[in-house]
Image (spheres, helix red, strand yellow):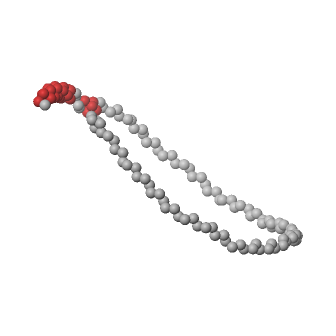
Amino acid sequence: MALKKILSASLLSPFLIICIIALLSVPVSVGARRLLEDPKPEIPTLPELPKLEMPKLPEFPKPELPKIPEIPKPELPKMPEIPKPDLPTFPEMPKMPEFPKFDAPKLPELPKPEETKVPAFTMPKFPGSP
């Protein structure tokens, strides 16, 4: 136990020292300095052009549509009514005689067989298994 602590402490301390040196050697604020040093190019502004006014067109009176005379709808000539032919009627069929209902003998109810119980199977434990 003590050997593990000494080994981990001896490996961990050089690793920590290397990480700290690496973090301190990298300049962190280089990006901010470059932003301050590089001047932004100025974008030239375009001169404002005077707004062009569209000349107003004279208003023309709206032409009225001529009225179309109404055309009477032509009426279709009436078709003569065709008499329906009389179909021959079938004679009425005599009613079927009613038969008494047949009662089938009832079968005796059989008791339901009970489900057989299967004994629970347990796995034997082997030595050396979890």
Q: Can residue 50 be seen in this view?
A: yes
Q: Quadrant of residue 7?
A: top left
Depicted 3 relative to depicted 86: above or below:
above
Residue 36 percent across, percent down from the top left: 26, 33
Percent from the top left, x then y, of residue 72?
80, 67
Numbered circles on residues, count: 0
- Nearest the viewer among 99 and 74 is 99
Residue depicted at 13% across the width and 31% down the height: 1
Q: Which residue is drawn at 51% across and 46% down?
A: 52
Q: Is residue 115 left or right of residue 18?
A: right
Q: In this rendered view, identify the residue nearer to me: 19 or 71.
A: 19
| Vertical comparison of 29 with 99: above or below | above
Q: Quadrant of residue 11 in the image?
A: top left
| Residue positioned 66% across, 59% down in the render | 62
Viewer-closest of 125 and 61: 125
At 72% across and 74% down in the image, what residue appears? Answer: 98
In this rendering, position of residue 68 left or right of residue 110:
right
x, y (%) of residue 48? 43, 42
For residue 25, side relative to residue 55 (left or right): left
Q: Is residue 81 visible?
A: no
Give the position of the C terminus as an image quadrant: top left
